[in-house]
Image (cartoon, helix red, strand yellow):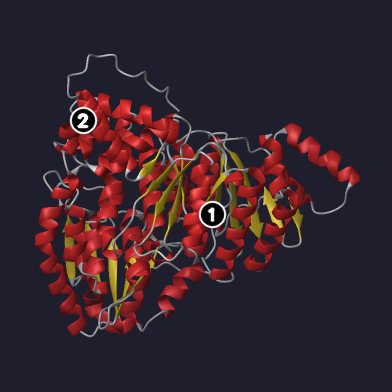
Amino acid sequence: MPTVSKPSTARRDRSAPRRSKAVSSAFESWASLGNYLPSVKNQFARLREQHFAERFWAKDPTLWSDDPQVCRAISNRLGWLSVLPSMREDCRILRAFSDEVRQAGYTHALLLGMGGSSLSPEVCRRTFGTAPGFLDLAVLDSTDPAAVRNAERRAPLEKTLFLVATKSGTTTETLCFFRYFFEKARQRAGNRAGEQFVAITDHGSPLVSIAAEKRFRRTFLNPSDIGGRYSALSYFGLLPAALLGIDIETLVDRAAALLPGAESAAQAEENPAILLGIALAQLGLHGRDKITFHLSPEIAAFGCWVEQLVAESTGKQGIGLFPVDGEPLGKPRSYGSDRVFVHMPLRPSRDSGAFRQLAAIEKAGHPLLRLELADKLDLGKEFFRWEIATAVAAACWKINAFDEPNVKESKDNTERLLQKLVGAGRFAMERPAARDSGVSLYGALPPAASAKVVARRKSTSGSRVRDLLIAHLRRAQAGDYLAILAYLAPTPATDRAFERLRRSLRDGLGIATSLGYGPRYLHSTGQLHKGGPANGLFLEITSEDLTDLAIPSLPYGFSLLKQAQARGDQEALESRQRRFLRLHLETKPEASLARIARWVERAFPPRSFLRRKQ
């Protein structure tokens, strides 16, 4: 992480004591920062002297970079700061469109997207559900053939409206989904198939031409100066929300409460979202860079959206904030000194157990930020709060929050691998380092770690796969994190197995963990994995696909696409000398994952971390 800058020694005016007291009060009302409060206050004072807040709302790109070329690119990514008034006006258009498709007989909607275009709709669907009489919307952002098939079988095809959502109009996964479902619709409706499709994209993107050619029902052109992960309060997030029957006007109004001049935003420099960004940046500089979220169950889906926003915006130049979503709360002794906790309870919260656990964590000296929501519609405010805070944190570190330079590397690897396999029809066979009971292991350990495994196996019996996996996990050091990269169809059973695995690693090794389903994570935490600090361990999990699904007009199906994405990211991580291992599940994934979780539980009981701390 960058070095913590020294406090300014500039002479302060006579109002400084009053301002300092007011700033302390502004933080202490929602943040327990302990010994880090002076550092945060000093950073706030420095930014005030630089007129940071005024420059931020004026969209000054030099806050994030001094490179003129980079600044020009940033200037075309700041539209989210001023889009709320126009979106508020367009809410009536979105509601009218929702009425139109309901009257046309549609009962379901399927959003085809990836990353920023799919995560906020997923949050809305899981948080609000479907209002009576509105469209039952689902999101497809997995290239696993089973996930695609499940989406196809979810509802009658003729009653389903398809939303094709991609800013660039070139996102590989989204266009593959479109090809697949458009052909299904064409087989039923012929030349009228396009009536079931809606595009959400930028002006001039290739999808605009496709939509015109295929005669889509409607094309919504999003402002081109809004990046994908900052698009929750634009057409990408609000159109799906309108189809679900959510009160989108109130959603936008709640967000607008953070705009300059709004009563709840107070003075520009004391905007609560800006204060949050300053706090996160300073805590990160002090090594508290693992932002651990705990949300009320009713709004838990928000975590996957904020995970992408924070990781992809800050994970660059060898630094970054690592968001921890979905990790069960533990005892204070389970955590290292790299954590900051964010509690987002929904009022009135009945989760008294979580409050007690977090109070104990706070008492143990971990920073705790508490952001209470009055009701679910406050998610509009939280979308905007975290967009602002993330951009502010990146600006404090002089990082461009609006690009994703290392995401393209895995995409390029995927395209290259797909071209190679077109003729062969499958990938060249790899030789696993070990295989046992339907699980094969790929990757290499350092010679010293491999020697320890060999020595251990001379005195014990058991699985070589297990021994190599445990040796890989033992490479974790204080301040590291483990990223589980799962190229499987998400199911309740796999989620339970991964939760069990993450709990064991947290309690046994004291490290933060994340779970990313591929290829979604490639458009989310994947940027931090490769562009952030080299303190990650990576465990990729792939599986055999029982069947494949052809992608119309392409020489490969979804199974090969998914394999190429997994291999492409493996190459990207290994090329950067990241600590990587892959487990391939040859039989039922649920049973194999349960066995892997048992291995880890036995190898890393909670006391093992306590010994490391002493």
Instruction: Tell which tag, 2 or 1, sits nearer the viewer.
Output: 1
Look at the picture and state if 391 lies above or below 86. above
Q: Quadrant of residue 328?
A: bottom right
Residue occupying the point 30% across, 34% down: 24
Residue occupying the point 38% across, 44% down: 310
The amino acid type, in three-letter code, at marker 1 is Leu
* Spot occupied by residue 192 in the image (x, y as percentages of width and height): 22, 79
- Whichever of callouts 2 and 1 sits on the residue coming sooner in the sequence is 2
**Residue projecting furthest to the right:** 459
The residue that mark 1 highlights is 329
- Residue 265 is marked as none
Q: Quadrant of residue 26?
A: top left
Residue occupying the point 37% across, 34% down: 281
- In this picture, residue 31 sits left or right of residue 533: left
- Residue 52 is marked as 2
* Spot occupied by residue 502 in the image (x, y as percentages of width and height): 59, 53
Q: Circle 1 sits in a helix, a strand or a loop, which is it?
A: loop
Mark 2: give few (<14), some (14-19) or many (20+) Cα within 10 Å: many
Look at the picture and state if 216 lies above or below 107. above
Q: Circle 2 sits in a helix, a strand or a loop, which is it?
A: helix
* Spot occupied by residue 296 in the image (x, y as percentages of width and height): 41, 61
Q: CA distance from mark 2 to mark 1?
A: 36 Å
The answer to whether residue 33 is seen in the rendering is yes
Mark 1: give few (<14), some (14-19) or many (20+) Cα within 10 Å: some
- In this picture, residue 442 sits left or right of residue 289: right
Residue occupying the point 31% across, 47% down: 386
- In this picture, residue 6 sits left or right of residue 213: right
User: Which quadrant of the rendered structure holds the N terminus?
Assistant: top left
